Image (tube, rainbow, N blue to C red):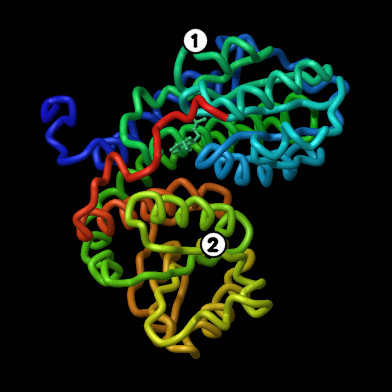
Amino acid sequence: TAAKKGGYPHFMLKEIHEQPDSLRNTILPRIQNKLPDFTADNIPDSLFDGITRIVITACGTAMHAGLIGRAMLEKLLRLPVTVEVASEFRYQDPIIDKNTLVITISQSGETADTLAALKLSRERGASTLSIVNVKGSSIARESDYVLYTHAGPEIAVASTKAYTAQLACLYLLAFRFGFATGKLEKEVCMDEMQQLLSIIPAVEETLAQDKVIEEISKQLTEKEDLFFIGRGLDYALSCEGSIKLKEISYIHSEAYAAGELKHGTLSLVTEGVPVVALATQQKVYSKMISNIREVKARNAFVILITIDGQEAEPSIYDYHISLPEIKDDYAPFLAAVVLQLLAYYTSLHRGLNVDQPRNLAKSVTVE
Ligand code: G6P
């Protein structure tokens, strides 16, 4: 298996480092003449004809990709989008009909709850599109349309490269249909595709901070509780950062919308409690900084993540990770890499089984 790990000590680390490639493979074939294009995926522009609502359903990390997808789809299509955990959705007698597009997201394409949610959606007449990594899997076969993530096989239980590839697919969808439905001008759409492509070298640059993140993670090995906070896309990403850390390091953590802290969780923030503060979104940056001041005032141990060029006074953080300059919408791709590495090294330093955490399975085919 050492050979299969390509020289890396664990599949997870290998898969984290494969992200420039998996993103390239997922994005490049879908940009033609500088515009997002699904001709080769057989997804027609008529997909959104008559669609008044989108429901995204998935489990675990794939569901967290959906949280980011929701923001992008709503922004570009101006249609209401909800994100539902598949195991809840299927038992909720969901209100879906032929005017609903149900998007299921799954790395394996075999998750039982997601598959059941998809089947129910079809029974109720919804259009269905799935974002899947494994070719020919059950979810791919059951869907009207499939958009494959070309992330390659993912072996580590904790999903990494599949997640960022899922994000890429959701962005491509949002932009293609924003353009196809006339809500987004061609020039603007072309410019966005340039931005999307720019994440590939930016993810490479972020990966080069591997050793810095390893050092920071040493500060977490003895901790038992921590928080991830952010606003907007950073909040959606916090949910993913939190599950990643929990899954493999067994440290309890919570993701909180930064503005909501004062409505409860702030009582748990005391001396030395680690808070991973995501502040990559310029449009809410000053609000986020004031939330960080609130936790720092309680002597939290703050790991701050910002984009290059954003000013942050050293009094509000203990460690600062700065990401390559990029527009708000694309920051999650870079910040995701940081959170993955943070979880990886924390698990490693705690001496745990990184690739196969206790009680968890890569693909859950039972309900
Ligand atoms: C399992 C895995 C998670 C994954 C979830 C959904 O719980 O441990 O990492 O996110 O299933 O899997 P899927 O294959 O549907 O994306």
The picture places residue 77, in percent across and down from the top left corner, at 77, 36
Compared to residue 13, the image places residue 39 above or below, namely above
Compared to residue 189, the image places residue 313 above or below, namely below
- Where is the C terminus found, in terms of image quarters? top right
Q: Earlier in the sequence, mark 2 or mark 1?
A: 1
User: What residue did someone put label 1 on?
Assistant: 136
Compared to residue 160, the image places residue 99 above or below, namely above
The picture places residue 324, in percent across and down from the top left corner, at 39, 55
Q: How many marks?
A: 2
Residue 35 visible at all: no
State yes or no: discs 2 and 1 in contact (Cβ < 8 Å).
no
Residue closest to the eye, 309 or 78:
78
Q: Amino acid at mark 2?
A: Ala
SS at badge 2: strand
Q: Residue at x 30, y 36 (%)?
A: 15
SS at badge 1: loop
Q: Residue at x 81, y 38 (%)?
A: 79
Q: Is residue 271 left or right of residue 193?
A: left
Q: Amino acid at mark 1?
A: Gly
Q: Is residue 106 left or right of residue 14?
A: right
The picture places residue 4, in percent across and down from the top left corner, at 17, 25
Q: Residue at x 61, y 22 (%)?
A: 115
Residue 53 occupies which quadrant of the picture?
top right
Label 2 vs label 1: CA separation?
34 Å
Residue 39 visible at all: yes
Residue closest to the eye, 245 or 258:
245
Local packing at callout 1 (Cα closer than 10 Å; few below 14, some 14-19, many 20+) is few
User: What residue did someone put label 2 on?
Assistant: 255
Which mark identifies residue 362?
A: none
The picture places residue 199, in percent across and down from the top left corner, at 43, 42
